[in-house]
Image (spheres, rainbow, N blue to C red):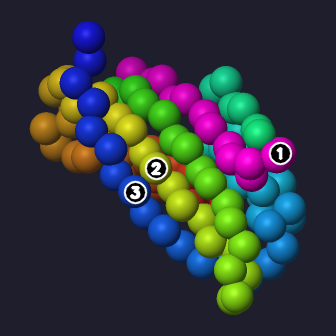
């Protein structure tokens, strides 16, 4: 069984929640996430990433705020490999998503 650690990051984005959800879905597929699931009722998007040096998942939850839409990104990555000693897998997973957002 893999050893996993999580990292949570919160951001507020200007824009409608439905529009931000579409952008998040596109960002996940562009970032190479597999098994992307979208829950329209709860405004949640999840995806898994498996590459040679990276394994984990990302869960994004959207909620309305006064300034726009709050995005809560929770990354869970495997930290029991040699690649995790050099760079945080959770940071890599978040970067894959945010670079395509």
Left or right: where 92 falls relative to 15: left
**Nearest to the observer: residue 35 or residue 41:** 41
Left or right: where 29 falls relative to 60: right
Residue 52 appears in the picture as rendered: yes
Report the span colored magenta. Answer: 40-52
| SS assignment at label 3 | strand
**Labels 3 & 2 near each other (Cβ < 8 A):** yes
Find the distance from the CA under tag 3 to the CA under tag 2. 4 Å
Mark 3 and mark 1 lie on one chain; the one further toward the N terminus is 3
Q: Give the residue number, with chain letter if any, for mark 2.
A: 74
Left or right: where 22 falls relative to 60: right
**Nearest to the observer: residue 39 or residue 34:** 39
Q: What secondary structure characterizes most of the magenta part?
A: strand
- Mark nearest the camera among 3 and 1 is 1
Whether residue 52 is situated above or below residue 65 in the rendered picture? above
Q: Give the residue number, with chain letter if any, for mark 3.
A: 8
Q: In the image, residue 95 lies at what x, y percent?
A: 47, 54
Whether residue 17 is situated above or below residue 39 in the rendered picture? below
Mark 3 is surrounded, within 10 Å at the Cα level, by few (under 14), some (14 to 19) or many (20 or more) other residues, namely some
Q: Give the residue number, with chain letter if any, for mark 1.
A: 40
Find the distance from the CA under tag 2 to the CA under tag 1. 18 Å
Which quadrant is home to the N terminus? top left
Outermost residue to the top? 1
- Mark nearest the camera among 2 and 1 is 1
């Amino acid at each position: 069984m893999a050893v996993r650690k999580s990292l949570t990051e919160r951001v507020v984005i200007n824009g409608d929640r439905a529009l931000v959800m579409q952008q998040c879905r596109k960002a996940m597929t562009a970032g190479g996430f597999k098994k992307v699931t979208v829950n329209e009722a709860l405004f949640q998007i999840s995806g898994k990433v498996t590459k040679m040096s990276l394994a984990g998942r990302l869960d994004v939850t959207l909620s309305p705020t006064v300034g726009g839409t709050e995005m809560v990104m929770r990354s869970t990555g495997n930290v029991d490999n040699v690649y995790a000693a050099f760079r945080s897998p959770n940071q890599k997973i978040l970067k894959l998503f945010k670079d395509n957002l």
